[in-house]
Amino acid sequence: MEQAQSPDQCDEQLAKLIGQLEKLESRFADFDEFLAEIYTKRDEIQSTLEGHKQQLITAQQRRVQNLNQAANVTFKSIEKRVARFDDVAALNSFFATDNMVQKLHQLSQSIRDLGDSVKADAIDSRLKAAQDQALRSLRDNQDIFEQGGKVLRLGKHRFSVNQQALDLSLVEHANILSLHISGTDYYESVTDQAFLDLQSMAKLDVASETDTVYRAEYLAYSVLKAAQQQQDDLSIEGLLQALKDNVLLKLIQTYAAPRYREGYVKGVHDHDAEKILHALLPCYEQAGLLRFDQASRANALLWLVVTTDEAVEQWCKQARNALLMKQHLSSVAAFDALKATLVELLPQHIPCDLERSADYVIRLLGAICIAG
């Protein structure tokens, strides 16, 4: 088995072992008990080596497939690059010395070494055909095009050529959101009303800034919300301590760094977000539960008024446990589960956000239970 590292070697080893068994069979032809054992070994050897051969063939084909896919990807890169050549000598030099072309030759040889000469020959033929086609296209372009293909020459006449790729995009045309094919005058208005309701979102350059929300405001809000939910290694206590230690700016920069898609400019939005949080955090700390809006607090208190003392005591214990797990173990699972339960249970005595009302109930009961 160790010496059979290829399908052909499996056949060689199988032939050798079968030959040895046939010699044993001829020597012990008169001993039936030995013959039965020899036949058993023959079947065992054949099945084992055939299975090993099949595994090697499967691995070999998988390797060939992966190499062939790599060759296809390399071909696409080569085709894009040769389209930009405007000189025959440079094109020939590219096919003779470029690393991607050499890589294709290596892939072809690797596939051939694995026994699939058909795919290897196909890669070589495709590379040769790509070179011939590129040379023909370049000569044709030199005959009828000028200025690197930007001008088409027909006798005495010259015509500009649009080389821009045809791409479909969403743009605002005549104050209407429309589909546009780049490089053309084609515009088609979008008529889907559900999509049009989100038209204001299409005007956003970045997701973190709107006409009414400044990017630094969104950054400050995101940091505070992550701290409330104890995400990204943030917490309210950590923000307050960072404010006291005068390292709040560094903390904000660490938070904003991986969020490059939101378009934060270092030295601008992080500094403004620091100023916002510098003013907001002391108010947040001093306000306590008053940071919840009046409607959410009133709705929660009205529910507590009509709830029995025994039920309130049970809710109190659950709220205390959820808050302790959140504060000391950074686990919000119990808090979120209790909050979801309360959202389903709370009646809406007055119009309010039930999630904020449930959040207020948990913090209120938990604080009372912990203090008591």
Image: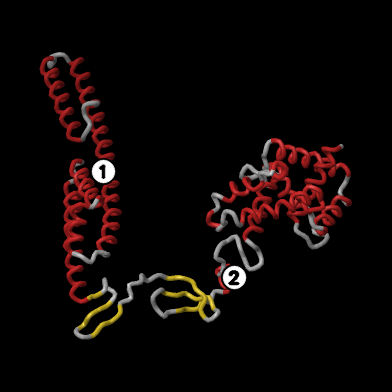
SS category of the residue bearing label 1: helix
Q: Position of residue 96 (x, y in %)?
A: 18, 53
Q: Which residue is drawn at 70% across and 52% down?
A: 277
Of 5 and 187, the residue lying toward us: 187
Q: Residue at x 83, y 58 (%)?
A: 294
**Which residue is most to the bottom?**
156
Q: Where is residue 304 in the image (x, y as percent from the top left)?
A: 86, 50
Amino acid type at mark 2: Ser
Which image quadrant for residue 85?
A: bottom left
Marker disc for residue 258: none
Amino acid type at mark 1: Gln
In the rendered view, tell whether residue 103 sits above or below residue 18.
below
Q: Where is residue 45 in the image (x, y as percent from the top left)?
A: 22, 26
- Label 1 crowd bin: few (<14), some (14–19), many (20+), radius 10 Å: some
Q: Residue at x 27, y 77 (%)?
A: 151
Q: Mark 1 points at which residue?
A: 61
Q: Nearer the viewer, mark 1 or mark 2?
A: 2
The quarter of the image holding the C terminus is top right
Q: Name the residue under label 2.
A: 200
Estimate the spatial distance between the alpha carbons at disc 1 and disc 2, rounded to whole Å.
52 Å
